Image (spheres, rainbow, N blue to C red):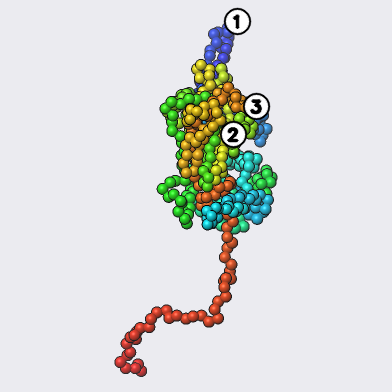
Amino acid sequence: TIIVLHIRPTVMRTTTLSLVPTIIYLHLFFCSVYAQLELDQDHKLDRYCGYNWLEANTFCRTACPSGLDADCPISPSGRTQSCFQGAGCFNRMETLYWTGVVAILFDAEEHMRNYQVTTTTETEAPEADNEETTADNDAVPTAALMGKIEELALEKTLISTLQILLDDKIYLAALDVKDQFYDRPCVQAVFPKVWDRGDPSKLALDVTMRITARYIPSSLTLYTDRDLGDVFISGLGDAQDITVRELKNANPFFNAVTGIAAVSEEDLAEAPSSMPSLSPTRDFDQVFETKIDPTPTGSSGIVFSLKTPKGGPSVRLVGMKFITPFDGVLEYEVYSKLGSWRNFVGRTHEFELIASGQVKGKGPKTWVDIIQDDHVGTVVNGNETTSVNYVGWNNIHILGDGGERSFYVTTTKRFLKEDQTSIPILFSSAMNSLSESLRQYGMVESNSELELYEGDGILDYPWPTDPNGKSPYYRRPRGPIIAFNYERSPCFPNVNFTGWPCPYVQRTRRPTLNPTRKPTKTPTVFPTRQPTRNPTRQPTIAPAV
């Protein structure tokens, strides 16, 4: 409520001019300020533009997180807006999520000429009399997938397009690439026939994306997740030529692009294959987890290895869980690299940050999920609240046939226990007590696709180097108490593929118009049916005259 005081003196005409007590008129205006941020929220989230605070609070059209008036639009008449702190917009907003596939269509010949890679697989030859086997190397031509730079170029282009489409009605919070494959059959099945995705001269990169947006509902505007997707799908179709042109200007990877469109993930249905899976009773999506140790130990972090068995296919990891005895908020980081970690202890720059975020611990008996879309968190420091950007979770692969991937999982010191010590991640003691303090690592858990090995418990963050294996900040060996969500045949229908990325299989050409063999000189004639023994009609008794 805003109280405006109008003060008007009353003048009485008498022999002398005098002022009588002032009359005060109170005008009460009600404004929607019920949505102010709480004290522990980032006030940068609630800065919005307007000609005055009342307009900024009412319409919440344009956010200005920087707090600068320069970030606010100027009207065609030249009238400027200002950026208002505490506009009362953010907590009135509802969040919309949409996940779908953006199909980027390439000229196959040009794209393969510029961005072809070769993946090598090993196939075992039939056994000889001496029971020895040999391996043949098969070179599979593969179109390269986008790297981080290309992904950022795609995201930036689509963000620019989407912001125009939303037209200030919906605030775009995030747009992220989640996955990418060439020519997914399920995507091709739902695309309009005009795209002719079956044409071998075309190549489609199907990119799974997640869009997060926020808006303020009212009696006139109520949006659903599906509405957000519909705006994006239809708008991308209308702006296809402009988007293609901007993609080509953004990065050379997109030089051969000929079209772009999107479909919603909920409209997809994986096409049935012509061959059954090797194990029809098991789904492609699997969970691999260790037993929860009833008497665990723990510290800031742990480094360990995950492998595929000899002869096994490549595997894609799509999620992770860990356990902490803490029941409050903690900040975590997960680093990973292909190959062994043994000579890279403490060398974080040699690893890739594949996951980070904030999560609430659930005690020593319950798994804590690493949240895939955990991109933004808040931190309170005294009276100040700041936002922190995180990675969430990025899907990664492990090469088949004995491939190895290392992981460094740790909590940070941003949040601490009440006694100001680090929040621990739980792990098990050495499986073999004789190997305590030695670099001897046994297998903790295994199944037909994965093998988990012991590693080193780490007592500090960030992890220190340990070139000679004598650092007091390490306990070894230690067994990770960890769980992974994974896809057991990510390159289906090539279920035995051991490389990465999944091979792009060139489609066969359309059939020729001419027959493949010459016709015979004289056709062989067969009667179409056995002749009847009786005539089909009875003869007339007398001829007609």
Residue 36 visible in the current orientation: no
Inspect the image, locate mark 3, and give the three-letter code of the amino acid beneath it: Leu
Inspect the image, locate mark 1, and give the three-letter code of the amino acid beneath it: Thr
Quarter-wise, where is residue 197 in the image?
bottom right
Q: Quadrant of the C terminus?
A: bottom left
Give the label on residue 298, or none: none
User: Between 224 and 349, which is closer to the camera in this rendering?
Assistant: 349
Residue in view at x 48 percent, y 33 percent = 482
- Earlier sequence position, callout 1 versus callout 3: 1
Residue 360 point in image, percent of width and height: 48, 27
- Dot 1 crowding, Cα within 10 Å, few <14, some 14–19, many 20+: few
Answer left or right for 534 relative to 357.
Answer: left
Q: Relative to 58, does residue 233 appear above or below in the rendering? A: below
Question: Marks 1 and 2, how far apart in space?
Answer: 97 Å
Residue placed under numbered mark 2 in the picture: 341
**Disc 2, SS:** loop
Residue 212 point in image, percent of width and height: 54, 37
Inspect the image, locate mark 2, and give the three-letter code of the amino acid beneath it: Trp
- Dot 3 crowding, Cα within 10 Å, few <14, some 14–19, many 20+: some
Question: Marks 2 and 3, how far apart in space?
Answer: 46 Å
Residue 520 point in image, percent of width and height: 54, 78
Residue 114 visible in the current orientation: yes
Number of the front mark, 2 or 3: 2
Residue placed under numbered mark 1 in the picture: 16
Q: Relative to 426, does residue 446 appear above or below in the rendering? A: below
Number of the front mark, 1 or 2: 2
Residue placed under numbered mark 3 in the picture: 68
Q: Relative to 510, does residue 182 appear above or below in the rendering? A: above
- Dot 2 crowding, Cα within 10 Å, few <14, some 14–19, many 20+: many
Residue in view at x 57 percent, y 14 percent = 8
